[in-house]
Amino acid sequence: MKLAVCIYEGPYNHEASDTAYNFIQAALKRGHEFKGIFFYHDGVYNVTKLMEPPQDDRHIANRWSQLGATGIDIVVCIAAAKRRGIVDDVLVPNVRISGLGQLTMMAIEADRLVVFGD
Amino acid sequence: MSEEKKKIMFTVRKAPHGSIYVYEGLEVKLIMAAYDADISVVFVDDGVFAVKQGQNTKALGIKGFAATYGALVDYEITKVFVDRQSMEERGMSEDDLLVIGEDEDTEEPIKPQVVDSDEIAAMMAEQHNILAF
Amino acid sequence: MLHTVNKSPFQNTTLESCIRFTRPGDVILLIEDGVLAAQADTSKSDMLSQAMATAEVYALQADLQARALTELVPGVKVTDYEGFVELVEKHSTHAWL
């Protein structure tokens, strides 16, 4: 199946990003394809390379970047990002900034869109 | 090729202003309205406060959005529903709802349609995908 | 329809609303703080039991374990992330945020 995921909450502060990540890993294991992963609201903070979590904890931004390296389209909403000071320069590799049109395409083209937030 | 338009629903369950969910959720609706999809919006739970008329965020110093909700019909978002029980539980009636546009022919104001939860549940079941805000 | 609920029923009426919009054949999946509803013998257990007359109720194992919830309302099914994906395969999803 073609899936898409939308994440609304920032890293560490809320479980949404972790639940989404674990869901995506399980979906890949079951052979699903992803139309994309879209970060919205404070979710845009998930992929900044400025984060430096303690070494004994998960590195949320790197985790998303590694997922992006496998070819999954990871999109940060430009409107939400600009509002919060997130620009291209601070993003980890393998993610991109784009518009809400991308979320629209995911909602239309994915067989299932799953939303994680607060 | 006559492929049917995909049904996309937005559920609004959060109160306005306390968080940005409703505001940024509205931005998604306006963008999505420009695409080839069959869009509907339902206000449930505290989401009904988002369509209460008379909202004024001036003293908060934040940009309000009631005016944009007032233009939903102009964006061709016409399937707009309010859950009756959520509205009544919150001491609101149909009179309290803001106007979302006017009828092209009669120029009569259009308000969100108040419906029962089983109707909303039936609509939800028909959707291709649902975005919650 | 798959309904995901991620809020504690002790603090928030989200689960109650979700149940009100649930139709026969639907599934409610408790995730994150939503799994607190699955704990047996609480003031919310009856609500969840009644919901099971209409819908199947699942709770996400990782979230249960993280919160040390072992005694569950009878009828609640425990699933893992792959089980979550299987539910998504079968149903379109609404997140009751």
Image (spheres, coloured by chain):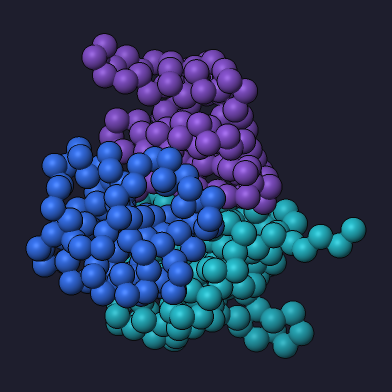
Image spot of residue C58 (x, y percent):
33, 55
Q: Is residue C41 above or below residue A22?
A: below
Image colour for chain B is cyan
Given the current orientation, which residue lies at the most extreme top position? Answer: A55
Given the current orientation, which residue lies at the most extreme right position? Answer: B1
Front position in the image: B13 or A108: A108
Residue located 41% across and 72% down the image: C21
Residue located 42% across and 55% down the image: C95
Left or right of A63: which side holds A30?
right
Residue located 29% across and 80% down the image: B89
Image spot of residue B41 (x, y percent):
55, 67
Question: Which one of the lettered chains is coloured blue?
Answer: C
Quadrant in the picture for the N terminus of chain A: top right
Q: Is residue A106 above or below residue C17?
A: above
Front position in the image: A28 or B43: A28
The quarter holding residue A88 reads: top right
Front position in the image: B114 or C69: C69
Image spot of residue A6 (x, y percent):
50, 42
Question: Which one of the lettered chains is coloured purple?
Answer: A
User: Can residue C60 be seen at all in this image of the molecule?
Assistant: yes
Front position in the image: A106 or C55: C55
